[in-house]
């Protein structure tokens, strides 16, 4: 009987030893894999950074990262080593997100990421106090963070053809230098109050949204063609290509005629008018 007890104890001890060895082996193997993955990651970061360095150019005294029609769905964190960049131009790269470390590029003046697949604007964008132009047209953005209002130098903001933006945070009225705003081809049903309170705004494109009417305070700078406005205002045929381009760019005559007709009609809807040959831009 005692021999059986001794034998069982020996087996259990041996089993315990082997279990410890197996556990240690698995832990060592896991650490080795993690180390290898880390090395691969470091190598890939270096390779990516080398490729990005090749895309850096100098134009008009600016240091520009320029990539066109080359796949870059994400940008490596090693990009922060190029923090002297003053302009990003990344078009048709398949970029899915603006990196969270964007706020570390304090020298950025222009951020042009149009024609990608970006769905969010990180809150860190507000750290770019020198940024003058933010161009994010032709993406998949749905909301705009209030932190964008901290970009005190911003003069130009383009969010056209994102198709799902419905409103802007009120804080954007603090963009005291913003003169150019393109919100065309989204889902706005009214002009956001933030826009109405932007003190320096000179040019606004609200074309191809879902606007049904305009506030009386809008008497300048807006293009709102191709919206379901309640008053039907039509334009006469253009006599030249230059005239058509100018009208599409500013929409000033169309806007003033609409406002004048809206005031004239009062509460009536479904009215129709034809734009006169010339309308005073001062209303």
Image (tube, helix red, strand yellow):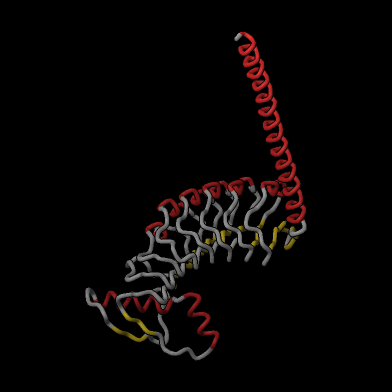
254 and 157: which one is in front?
157
Depicted 185 relative to depicted 197: above or below: below
- Residue displayed at 68% across by 32% down: 26
x, y (%) of residue 118? 55, 58
- Residue displayed at 70% across by 25% down: 21
x, y (%) of residue 250? 48, 75
- Residue displayed at 62% across by 8% down: 2
Q: Quadrant of the N terminus?
A: top right
Left or right, 192 with respect to 42, comes to left
- Residue displayed at 48% across by 60% down: 200
The residue most toward the left is: 267
Q: How many marks?
A: 0
x, y (%) of residue 102? 61, 49
Left or right, 29 with respect to 260, comes to right
x, y (%) of residue 254? 40, 79
The residue most toward the front is: 1
């Amino acid at each position: 009987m005692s021999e059986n007890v001794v034998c069982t104890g020996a087996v259990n001890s041996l089993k315990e030893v082997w279990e410890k060895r197996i556990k240690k082996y698995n832990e060592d193997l896991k650490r080795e894999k993690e180390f290898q993955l880390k090395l691969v990651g470091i190598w890939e970061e270096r390779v990516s950074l080398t490729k990005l360095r090749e895309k850096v150019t100098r134009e008009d005294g600016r240091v520009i990262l320029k990539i066109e029609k080359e796949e870059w769905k994400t940008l490596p964190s090693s990009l922060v080593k190029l923090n002297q960049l003053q302009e990003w131009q990344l078009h048709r790269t398949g970029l899915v997100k603006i990196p969270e470390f964007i706020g570390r590029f304090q020298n950025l003046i222009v951020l042009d990421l149009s024609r990608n697949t970006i769905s969010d604007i990180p809150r860190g964008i507000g750290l770019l106090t020198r940024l003058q132009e933010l161009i994010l047209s032709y993406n998949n953005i749905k909301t705009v963070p209030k932190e964008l209002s901290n970009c005190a130098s911003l003069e130009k903001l383009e969010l056209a053809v994102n198709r799902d933006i419905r409103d802007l945070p009120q804080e954007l009225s603090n963009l005291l230098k913003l003169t150019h705003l393109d919100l065309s081809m989204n889902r706005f049903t009214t002009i956001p109050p933030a826009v109405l309170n932007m003190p320096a705004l000179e040019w606004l494109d609200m074309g191809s949204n879902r606007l049904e009417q305009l506030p009386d305070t809008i008497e300048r700078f807006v293009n709102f063609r191709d919206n379901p406005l309640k008053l039907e205002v039509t334009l006469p045929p253009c006599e030249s290509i230059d005239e058509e381009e100018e009208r599409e760019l500013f929409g000033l005559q169309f806007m003033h005629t609409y406002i004048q007709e809206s005031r004239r009609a009062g509460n009536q809807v479904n009215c129709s008018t034809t734009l006169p040959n010339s309308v005073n831009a001062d209303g």
